[in-house]
Image: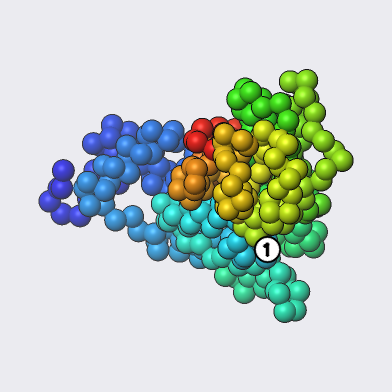
Amino acid sequence: MLLPGKPTIRDIAKLAGVSHSTVSRALNGSTLISLSTREKIRNIADQMGFEFNEGARRLKNRKTGIIGIIYFSVLNDFRSSLYTNELFRDLRHNLESVGLDALLVEAYSGQSGQSNIVRLIRQNKVDGFIIIHPEIRSEDYQLILAQKLPVVHVHIVPELAPRDSMDCFFTDNFQGGLLAGQHLVDSGCKKIQVVRINEKKSEEFRLRTAGFLDAVEKAGLFVDENHDLTCRCSYEGGYQVADANLKYLETLDGIFVPADIMAFGFLNALREEGLRVPQELKVIGYDDSPVSRMTLPPLTTIHQPRETLTEKACHRINSLLFGDAPAIPVVEYLKPTLVIRESA
């Protein structure tokens, strides 16, 4: 489909059967254009060898083309979450797809405690923020608003800011926990337990546990509150809680481990001790990390809609940045799904 000479937006518009303004909006990632139309236009542009002049767009709008991805320092620990590593990757790729670049930065300096958000704003290094952090300081929000910079929250629910005044894309963690509980009940489990995360400020884990308990109670079963299985959200945490409570686990037939990284350690400890999964104990995780397909046995888990979360967040901030997005904040809780493998 290559045309003689350098292809233009009007050439793409003619082939796509749309206006040149629609092509421009689609190539800018505008959510005012349907996803199917955006994909059609991008495919035509790729086939024609069209190169979008990103530099001209940024100069016209006085933008850097860089979005600061502000994250919680605990996410630096690979052991804490395989999911967030994939989340960072998808955010980078989705920003690139709309012509933007990502700058990953901890919210606050580990040495001085000073705000990197303030530093980035004062140095004019970014055009806006995607935030993965529960506790951004109020003064940082005030500065972001004063500078009229777009901000989108993703994955981690902000606890210190009003959610109805900002754009947010989250997983419905209560629904995810509910799916986990329902699956164990439907699999015939009668003696069920949940491993709890000892992070009191983590709403995502509180909601997963609450949804799980709701499903169990609705089935007329109960969780033994007198036997507390609590650990850190890490491989070591999952391994240690299983290893230290083996005799108790032998009395159960189903258990929910609300993060895959913990479930991997949990499964390995059970296998070393000879407790068979799923014959003697059914185990279900949460996240659907790629490694969950390779555990022994492969892990039944809850899939977080990471791909949709990141795509929505990146297209939304792009639309906010270039002024074609509705002013009303978007708050979406996307539904997770159950992935059945061999562990439950």
Residue 94 vs residue 270, the one in the foreground: 270
* Residue drawn 64% across the image and 33% down it: 180
Q: Is residue 114 something one can see in this rendering?
A: yes
Q: Position of residue 104 (x, y in %)?
A: 56, 65
Residue at screen point 77% across, 24% down: 221
Which image quadrant: the C terminus? top right
Residue at the image position 82 percent from the left and 36 percent from the top: 224
Residue 165 is at least partly visible in this image: no
The x and y percentages for residue 222 are 80, 28
Q: Is residue 197 left or right of residue 16?
A: right
Residue type for callout 1: Val
On screen, residue 6 above or below 123: above
Rendered residue at 63%/70% (across/down):
120
- Of 322 and 119, which appears nearest the observer? 119
Above/below status of 264 relative to 328: below
Secondary structure of the residue carrying tag 1 is helix
Give the residue furthest to the bottom. Answer: 111
Local crowd size for mark 1, using a 10 Å CA cut-off: few (<14), some (14–19), many (≥20): few
Residue 322 or residue 202, whichever sits in front? 202
From the viewer's perspective, is residue 106 above or below residue 317?
Answer: below
- 260 above or below 305? below
Q: Position of residue 307 (x, y in %)?
A: 49, 44
Task: Locate the N terminus by quadrant.
Answer: top left
| Residue 16 coordinates in the image, percent (x, y) | 28, 35
